[in-house]
Image (cartoon, grey):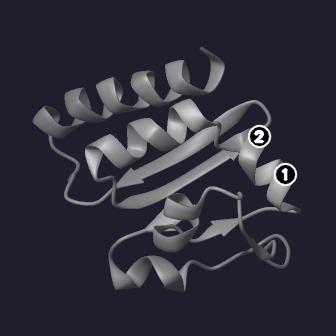
Amino acid sequence: MRVGEHFLTRVAFIESSPPPKVATGEKLWDQHVTTFAASGSEAARAFPPRLRNLLASWGFQGHLEVRPGGLAVYMTGLRPVVEHYQRMFGITREILHAIVG
């Protein structure tokens, strides 16, 4: 999923074609977030309501990939400096809890 800054729409898919843009069925999410998955139901499972609510409460802007066995997170405004590493660790932990909790 991607939301926010314009450059996030320019992500390159190296290994294969990008999955199609889909809707999760949650109106607010679908209006503000670009979600890619094999299907809308797969997207809804990858981004369960608890995770969608968490990201919305943060006003999340960035890129989040959820895949079997892992995830990738980019949050707008964070840089590769020590203070931001700690913040990203906390963000990642909360995202994981929202997915599996």
Residue sitting at the far top: 101
What is the quadrant of the C terminus in the image? Answer: top right
Kind of residue at badge 1:
Ser
Instruction: Report the side of 57 relative to 41 (left or right).
Output: left
Which picture quadrant has residue 4? Answer: bottom left
- Residue at 41% from the left image edge and 36% from the top image edge: 54
Q: Counting other residues with Cα less than 10 Å from the Cα at mark 2, is it few (<14), some (14-19), or many (20 or more)?
A: few
Residue of label 2: 45
Which picture quadrant has residue 3? Answer: bottom left
3 w.r.t. 7: above or below? above
Kind of residue at badge 2:
Arg
- Residue at 22% from the left image edge and 27% from the top image edge: 86
Q: Counting other residues with Cα less than 10 Å from the Cα at mark 1, is it few (<14), some (14-19), or many (20 or more)?
A: some
Residue of label 1: 41
What is the quadrant of the N terminus in the image? Answer: bottom right
Tell me the distance, in whole angstroms, between the alpha carbons under discs 2 and 1.
Answer: 6 Å
Residue 91 % position (x, y): 34, 32
Q: Report how many numbered discs are placed on residues in the image.
A: 2
Instruction: Report the side of 85 relative to 28 (left or right).
Output: left
- Residue at 71% from the left image edge and 57% from the top image edge: 24
Instruction: Report the side of 39 relative to 70 (left or right).
Output: right
Which circle marks residue 77 in the picture?
Answer: none
Which picture quadrant has residue 18? Answer: bottom right
Residue 61 % position (x, y): 34, 60
72 w.r.t. 61: above or below? above
Check if mark 2's residue and mark 1's residue have beta carbons within 8 Å.
yes
SS of the residue under disc 1: helix
Seen from the viewer's position, the closer of residues 87 and 55 is: 55
SS of the residue under disc 2: helix
- Residue at 64% from the left image edge and 19% from the top image edge: 100
Residue 16 % position (x, y): 85, 74
